[in-house]
Amino acid sequence: MTDKLMVVIPCYNEEEVLPETARRLTEKMAALTQRGLIAPESRVLLVDDGSRDRTWELIEGLHKQNPLFEGVKLSRNRGHQNALLAGLMTARNGFDVSISMDADLQDDMDAMDRFLEKYREGCEVVYGVRRKRDTDTAFKRGTALMFYRLMRALGVDITFNHADYRLMSNRALDALSEFGEVNLFLRGLAPLVGFQSDTVVYDRSERFAGESKYPFKKMLAFAIDGITSFSVKPLRLITTVGLVIFVVSMLMLLYTLVRWAAGHTVTGWTSTLASIWMIGGIQLLSLGVIGEYVGKIYNETKRRPRFIIDRYLNQRGDPPVTDRA
Ligand code: UDP
Ligand code: MG
């Protein structure tokens, strides 16, 4: 028996690429069905993340024309990770396996065959890994590399150059649903879910049309979220810095006492000012880092829903899922 696949695609203002994405997906899904890798009841779920353009109208049109396409409309824009989660949680009902990918055709669809072969071999999670990033700007490549290095250094288990192009089995999705955190960083959570996993290497191409929905500011916020959601090492670093400053200040005290005993009481204006600024700076920075974690706790304790689904277009008449159902 072949398995039912749900391809989950978050879409935010993607009217320019959606028709082409839909066309290629129709072909791909037909080919996969023909190869016997997926069941004919497999579907593509387009998640509209509160778009301001005609994305939802396009999704409605696609659903009407072809039952292959299902649509979920979020009640408002909640960001890529939340939209993806909403889609994946919808896929838990009645589907055996899910593949998440971006709407902009940057992820090579032909890698899906290999994803599904790995799944056949028993993998519950398959990570799509970019071979090279020469379609990205040097800046994006550089910052991404720094980010992955930093994450690794902080002890976070993360797959290098893996974005959110990923296969997850129904079992893995059930496990994922047990993670209740509001600060979502799915590519860090997937390894925590565990199970047998593997990677598939693919070439990432350029965005087909439209512009990136991840400007530098969002990327930076995403990176900080990723780090503070998965590692408390920055807090330990503060303790270490505090300790070092304490030791240095003791040495300074000793030095001034010795100078005083020797009768040299000329006051050093430069050293006083320098140390005030330096310690003040370190203190503020440390407060900021601690504040980052306090903010996380604040958001987690409220346990607000991570997504609210307005509508779910499907032919089975399934109702929209709710978060933490
Ligand atoms: N996206 C979303 N909500 C947002 C921002 C982005 O659902 O608030 C979707 C977007 O439509 C796309 C995917 O997330 O399918 C990745 O975004 P994008 O391609 O702009 O990011 P990049 O590839 O530049 O990192
Ligand atoms: Mg993209």
Image: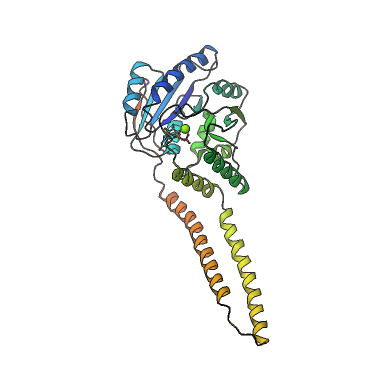
Residue 231 in the image: above or below residue 200: below
Q: Position of residue 48 (x, y in %)?
A: 37, 31
The answer, for residue 18, to whether it is visible in the render is yes
x 48%, y 54%: residue? 292
Q: Position of residue 99 (x, y in %)?
A: 50, 27
> Along the horizontal axis of the image, is 168 left or right of 218?
right
x 31%, y 26%: residue? 57
The answer, for residue 325, to whether it is visible in the render is no
The quadrant in which the C terminus is found is top left
Q: Nearer the viewer, residue 6 or 243?
A: 243
Q: Position of residue 234 (x, y in %)?
A: 57, 55
Q: Nearer the viewer, residue 144 or 247?
A: 144
Q: Nearer the viewer, residue 303 or 285?
A: 285
Q: Nearer the viewer, residue 324 or 304?
A: 304
Occupied quadrant, residue 68: top left
Q: Position of residue 106 (x, y in %)?
A: 49, 28
Please tell me how many numbered marks the rendered image carries: 0
